[in-house]
Each structure stands twice: as structure tokens, then as C-alpha cells.
Amino acid sequence: MLFVEVGGPMGIQDQDLAGKIIKSYELRDMIGKGSFGAVYSAYHIPVKRDVAVKVILPEYANHPDFIRRFESEAQLVARVEHPYIIPLFDYWREPNSAFLVMRYLRGGSLRDLLSNQGPLDVEVVARILDQVTAALTVAHNQGVVHRDLKPGNILLDEQGNGFLADFGIAKDLRIASDATLQGALVGSPSYLSPEQVRSEEVSPQADIYSLGIVLYEMLTATKPFSEDSGISMLLIHQLNDPLPNVRDKTPRLFRRSQQGDPAGHRQGPSQSLPERGDHGCCFSAGCAAHRARERRRGARNPDPPAALKRLSAGWPLAAAFFPER
């Protein structure tokens, strides 16, 4: 059974709840919408705080499988606390809808930033990479796999810091059963790992694969595989093809990352990897971005981000990224 969960306007009703007060929350502008509902900026009247409210469509709010997933999302976010994971303030269900109340960030999403600016500066890439990998490390240590890592689910504050959001289809590895229908394909097609495409059991490595694609997009402002030929061909590419070589699109990043090393030391992942087209090369580019930023700050031989080291532990290509020195 094919059940692709995709962000976007498909399935959303035309009803706009802006201006309505639900419980003690005044809904203001709709700031996002998808197949299951919409997200509004809102104002919590009793405590005078701006929040974001996710409103679930009635046809899903009353579906038993969706109810389990809705409650699972609330419980997972409450359990996985980290400075760069969007916190949950409240949640409840009503006869015809369901609601999640979260922290409101005014910087939009990483998707918005890429659409407006194109390829990001290495300092921006390195900062967001550090923050998201740190958040994912905590989630994985708690037995939670996000399963839908993409630029639209990385939100930004006004200083440009990145926060991991939307655990709506996250998998709790501590629970044997999954509320998702057996054999369903869960996630956003452009960012699916091969095991998700095959509807196999997922592990933290699925998020790492998706993060590699997000990193590719931050560096190039393009997705590695075109969606023009349709979802079926896109999934075939995801299964069978390596990522295009990010070095070909960001040669200056690698030249810059080696500056300030008069001894010519070949340390770190970007210098240790051969020319290759898989997402390992994409992660090496992310580490090169991190080192370029640290060198600008005066560090002579900076290490790759510690969170990325921890996140990649046990991944087959990790040894290539972080060789013993």
C-alpha cells in the first residue's frame, strides 16, 4: 500500500480560522498548511504569549489511527526536550478537530530561507547543521526517529537559529507497534531514506540520510534528484543513485576550508574522502563549512562539529568522515 505523506496544500479545506478564539487562544494568521491541517500564529490571552497552533482537520481528528499518532506526537515532543527542538505547550482533542500548541518562531522555515536567498553562506550552513544535529542526537538517544526531516520542518528564530519541528510521523523505537499502516510509505518523497522507500524498519540512520539531503540543499539550493518526472521515478533515484557530487557545485567551500593550514595537513572529512557522489561527500561539505567558520574565528585546526560526530556514530561512512588523527 502506498501512503505518501507530503507537505503542501493537498487535502486542506478552504476554511480559515484566523480571528477565531479557541479555548483561550486567539488564532491570527495561517502560517502553514498541509494534508492534515493548518498552523496558525496565535495569542494565548491569559499569559499574553505568542504561540503557534496546529489545527487538525476533522476527518483525521476522529480517525482512531490518527488519534493514536496525534497523542504519540504530543508525548514524544514532551519527552524529547532540547533547546533546538520546538517545545510543546498544550494539546487537546475536540469532537471535530485536534490542536497542538507550540512555541512560535518568527523567522519562518529553512525552506523559506532557501527560496528567498538560494545557497546559504557557510557560516549559516554550519550553525544550522550544528543545531539540528544536536537536536537529532538527543531525539535518537531517547529512541525517537523523526522520519520527516526536511527544510520545511526546520524552523528559524529571528537570529537565524535552526529548530527541529513536527514530530507528527516520528517513530518511537521503544514501542514495537507503529500507528502507521503496515506497508505504508511515510515521509516526504524528496527526503526519504532507502529503507523508508522500501517500507522497512527505520533506525536513526534514516534521519541521517535525510539530513544529508537537507545539507545538500542548503549548500546548493537544489534538490539532488528532480521531482519533474513524478514520485515513482524520484523514488527509483532515491533507491539506486548516489547523490550528485556536492563538490562540483561548491568548489570554493573546499578551497576555503583548507586555508590557514600552512603545514598542508589533510585533516577532517572533506580531505579524507575520495571524489564520490554519495551523501557522505555532502556531509564532508558540511564539516568543511564548519571548519571554514571556525577558521574565520581564529581556530587553526578546528574539529568537525561534535554533534555531527556523535550523530554519525555507527553509520557505515562515519569512519570516512572522522578518521583517527
Image: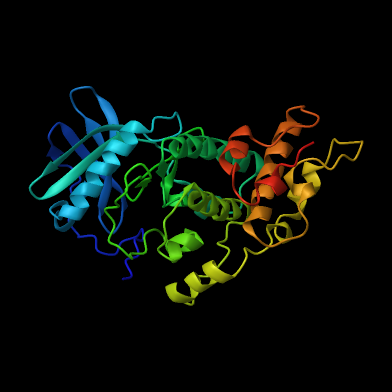
Q: Is residue 116 left or right of residue 47?
A: right
Q: In which quarter of the image is residue 276?
A: bottom right
Residue at the front extreme of this rendering:
176
Whether 88 is drawn above or below 72: the answer is: above
Residue under the image location 48 percent in, 39 percent down: 136
Whether 172 is drawn above or below 37: the answer is: above
Whether 22 is drawn above or below 31: the answer is: above
Residue at the left extreme of this rendering:
95
- The location of residue 16, given as percent across then percent down, is 19, 52
Residue 129 or residue 199, whichever sits in front: 199
Residue under the image location 14 percent in, 54 percent down: 58
- The location of residue 186, given as percent across then percent down, is 36, 60
- The location of residue 257, given as percent across then percent down, is 77, 42
Q: Quadrant of the N terminus?
A: bottom left
Q: Can see residue 279?
A: yes
Q: Is residue 121 left or right of residue 25?
A: right
Q: Can see residue 52?
A: no
Residue under the image location 84 percent in, 43 percent down: 266
Residue 127 or residue 187, whichever sits in front: 187
Q: In this view, does 209 lie to the left or right of 181?
A: right
Q: How many labels does the image show?
A: 0
Image colouring: rainbow
Q: In which quarter of the image is residue 139?
A: top left
Q: In which quarter of the image is the C terminus?
A: top right
Residue at the top extreme of this rendering:
47
- The location of residue 19, given as percent across then percent down, is 17, 42
